[in-house]
Amino acid sequence: MTYNLDVTKEHCPMTFVKTKIELNKLRKGDILNVKVIAGEPLENVPRSATEQGFNVLSVTETATPGIYNIEIEK
Amino acid sequence: MSEEKQTKKLSIIAFSGDFDKLTAVFTLATGAAAVGYEVNLFFTFWGLDAIKLKLGRSPVGKGFLPKVFGIMMGGLKASPVSRLNFLGVSPKIFRYMMRKNNVATLEELVEAAKQLGIHFYACEMAMHILGLQKSDFIPEIKDVLGVASFLKLSEGGQTLFI
């Protein structure tokens, strides 16, 4: 299943805290699309997901400039 | 050479019951847990106020003096800021400013810490002085520890005193 999470209004550490909490809820093979702003969240969210063994499938800029979508597979 | 994967570990001694210092404790703790650290929080002295089941001012504790302390210090909702507390007005202003700026409040950080499976421990000696029991605290308190057990837990990781 695919889930969505928007952390564009969040700040450190809640950007990656909320991402981790959501990832913990997923089953193996599920996908989480995380919407983040450029800067620290864009660097931290994919890096911490990769370090913890999740699969970062893609990082793409959305139609709104400065907002990115990170596709993470559990 | 061992092929075992080393778990990164952060242990924080939460000594202060101040709102701002507790915010630092839970910000660091949740951030570390979210990036894969094993996190241990050891609450001692005024830090114990943060994990009381009663969030406001309440006569928690066994005996007259502990009850007086319980009312004076209160729980998480009654935590003062370390500077310019203005009789408890400043924490309310801080909470308002945090919400307004979309920054997680202390209560949200504590909730996130629970969800991330951070380990909460209470200091046996401070509990004894303040007449507190494990049942006075939130159920997430994993255990009541002494110094030796905490040192064993924190071994091989980073330790902070806040």
Image: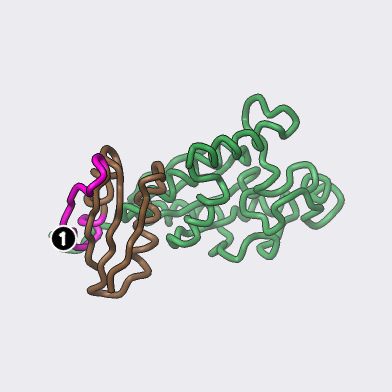
Please identify the quarter of the rendering in which residue B63 is found.
bottom right
In the image, the segment drawn in magenta is A49-66
When the figure is inspected, residue A27 is found, relative to residue B130, above or below; the finding is below
Query: At 15% across and 63% down in the image, what residue appears?
Result: B3
Instruction: Identify the hue of chain A.
Output: brown
Side of A60 relative to B79 (left or right): left
Q: Residue furthest front?
A: A63
Which residue lies most toward the left here? Answer: B1
Chain letter for green?
B
* Image point (53%, 51%), residue name: B108
Estimate the x, y position of residue B138 in percent, counting from the top left: 62, 61
Q: Chain of mark 1?
A: A
Q: Is residue B28 left or right of residue A72?
A: right
Q: Is residue B1 above or below residue B105?
A: below
Residue shown at 62% from the left, 54% from the top: B51
Q: Position of residue A74 (x, y in %)?
A: 25, 68
Count of residue discs: 1
Q: Secondary structure at mark 1?
A: strand
Examine the structure image and report whether residue B100 is included in the region drawn in magenta.
no
Looking at the picture, how far across and down is residue A18, in whole percent? Answer: 39, 55
Residue on which the image places disc 1 = A57
